[in-house]
Amino acid sequence: MPNKALEQLTIFKHASHAAKNRLIKSAVREYYHRGDVLFRQGKPAEYLWFVLEGWVHLVREDTADDAAHAIALFTVTPQEMLCGVSVLSPPSTYTATAIAGGDVAALRVPAALIQQILKQEPAVCYEVLKLCAQRLRHMAEHCSVMAQDVPSRITQVLLRLYEQFGETIPVTHRELAQLAWTTTESAIRAVSRLKEEGLVEGKRGVLLLKQPQALRQFVVAGQSHGEVSNGHRSRQAHSESRA
């Protein structure tokens, strides 16, 4: 592994020279194209990947041959970098499938080596812990959004991707549907509505968020409408129960 690649991994900034040398000898830089699989759900967790360029979707499937109903749990970018954290609790299997969302450059590190470094390097362990805590927070926020209606879920997903990618988001309708836990057809309808409102523009595989703040207001308005509707239904049900 080139030293330059190691320098991109901020979690190893305070690692010892011995740990860095072991990484340089053992880590392998690999390249993937959109749709390529880094690892599959249910397979032995033998490597940890560090995403250097591009992004990787972590997709959960009910069964190995049920890709049509898969949901995306998280999107790993160079900011989050860790891909395949199942190796941190050996012996284990991968709990999701990792699929390249575009052109990806990543470092593949043997599980045994990363486990050894985490035991011996407190500073590295602390940085990994921070990344895992950040991911848990993001995933908890994502799960809480799933109780909302589809347009709100799609908008929330777009805002989260905006934080990761900026105004230009490389995502297909199918990927958006997986991230929002809905169907591709529902995602298309929701995006079409946002386009009609002038909030987003897009072409095949790319969406441009023109007004992020307006999108946030769109979500708040949708939540308020939902609260009013739910309150109305509750009062109506209560009245009917008393009648």
Image (cartoon, rainbow, N blue to C red):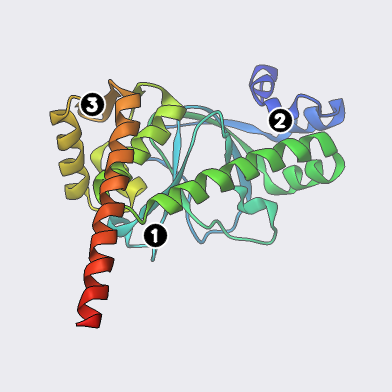
Say which of marks 1 and 3 sits in front: 3
Mark 2, residue position: 11
Query: Could you tell me the amino acid type at mark 3?
Result: Leu
Which residue is found at the position 44% from the left and 53% from the top? Answer: 143
Residue 59 seen: no
**From mark 1 to mark 3, how far is it between C-alphas?**
32 Å
Residue at the disc numbered 3: 199
Please tell me which residue lies in front, 76 or 151: 151
Decide which of tag 1 and tag 3 comes sooner along the chain: 1
Q: Amino acid at mark 2?
A: Ile
Image-based side of 139 in relation to 34, left or right: right
137 lies left or right of 18: left
> In the image, is residue 241 above or below residue 29?
below
Instruction: Residue 196: name its quadrant.
Output: top left
Position of residue 90 relative to residue 52, above or below, is below
Label 1: how many residues lie within 10 Å, few (<14), some (14-19) or many (20+)?
some
- Residue 73 picture location, percent across and down: 44, 50
- The answer to whether one can see residue 217 in this image is yes
Label 2: element kind: helix
Determine the residue positioned at 15% across, 36% down: 192
Q: Which residue is mark 1?
A: 61
The quadrant where residue 200 appears: top left
